[in-house]
Image (spheres, helix red, strand yellow):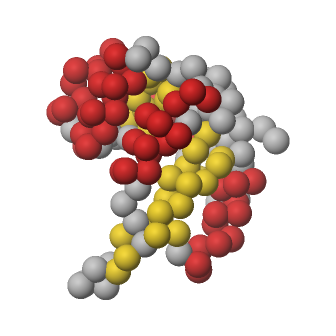
């Protein structure tokens, strides 16, 4: 997938939990730069690490001058303002939807920029210890 859109640098935004350190190391080994958010535990015992603000801040400010075009993987309507801003700045290449069925209707305005991830499922699906048939993760 990263090759398809000629992505040279990929960020992975995630809530940090000490017990998942080996998972984070694996993601880094695939070539991703991780951006962590502290996590909290809510009243039900569920751990949350909402990364919306981090993704917007990095895309619109921190990394803004460091890239030509952005490819965002999300079907969340909370990023509408980011998509609008990046479009106005001519910096949004694609919005990759993990699942079109659960995509926010707010994204309809950006339909021409959408790419449904399920098209390339065989390239990225987890097959035991193997990445999909052709491998979608960046080559090291």
Residue 134 found in image quarter:
top right
For the question of whether residue 114 can be seen, the reply is no
Q: Is residue 114 left or right of residue 3?
A: left
Question: Which residue sits at x=58%, y=44%?
Answer: 11
For the question of whether residue 140 can be seen, the reply is yes
- Against 36, residue 122 (above or below) is above
Front in this rendered view, residue 91 or 125? 91
Question: Which residue sits at x=53%, y=75%?
Answer: 17
Q: In this view, does 117 lie to the left or right of 137?
A: left
Question: Which residue sits at x=40%, y=29%?
Answer: 95
Q: Position of residue 16 (x, y in %)?
A: 52, 69
Q: Is residue 74 left or right of residue 24?
A: left
Residue 101 found in image quarter:
top left
Q: Is residue 140 left or right of residue 59?
A: right
Front in this rendered view, residue 121 or 56? 56
Question: Which residue sits at x=57%, y=27%?
Answer: 65
- Against 17, residue 28 (above or below) is above
Front in this rendered view, residue 60 or 91? 60
- Against 130, residue 17 (above or below) is below
Residue 98 found in image quarter:
top left
Q: Position of residue 1 (x, y in %)?
A: 59, 32
- Against 55, residue 27 (above or below) is below
Front in this rendered view, residue 36 or 97? 36
Q: Where is residue 84 in the image (x, y as percent from the top left)?
A: 30, 25
Assign the C terminus to one quadrant of the image.
Answer: top right
Q: Where is residue 124 in the image (x, y as percent from the top left)?
A: 58, 42
């Amino acid at each position: 997938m990263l090759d398809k859109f000629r992505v040279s640098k990929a960020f992975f935004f995630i809530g940090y939990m000490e017990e998942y350190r080996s998972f984070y190391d694996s993601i880094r080994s695939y070539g991703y730069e991780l951006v962590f958010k502290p996590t909290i535990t809510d009243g039900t015992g569920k751990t949350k690490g909402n990364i919306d603000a981090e993704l917007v801040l990095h895309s619109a400010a921190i990394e803004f001058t460091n890239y030509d075009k952005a490819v965002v993987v999300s079907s969340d309507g909370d990023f509408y303002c980011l998509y609008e801003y990046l479009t106005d700045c001519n910096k949004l290449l694609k919005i990759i939807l993990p699942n079109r069925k659960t995509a926010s209707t707010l994204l309809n305005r950006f339909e021409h920029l959408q790419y449904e991830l399920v098209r390339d499922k065989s390239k990225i699906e987890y097959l035991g210890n193997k990445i999909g048939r052709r491998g979608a993760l960046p080559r090291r």
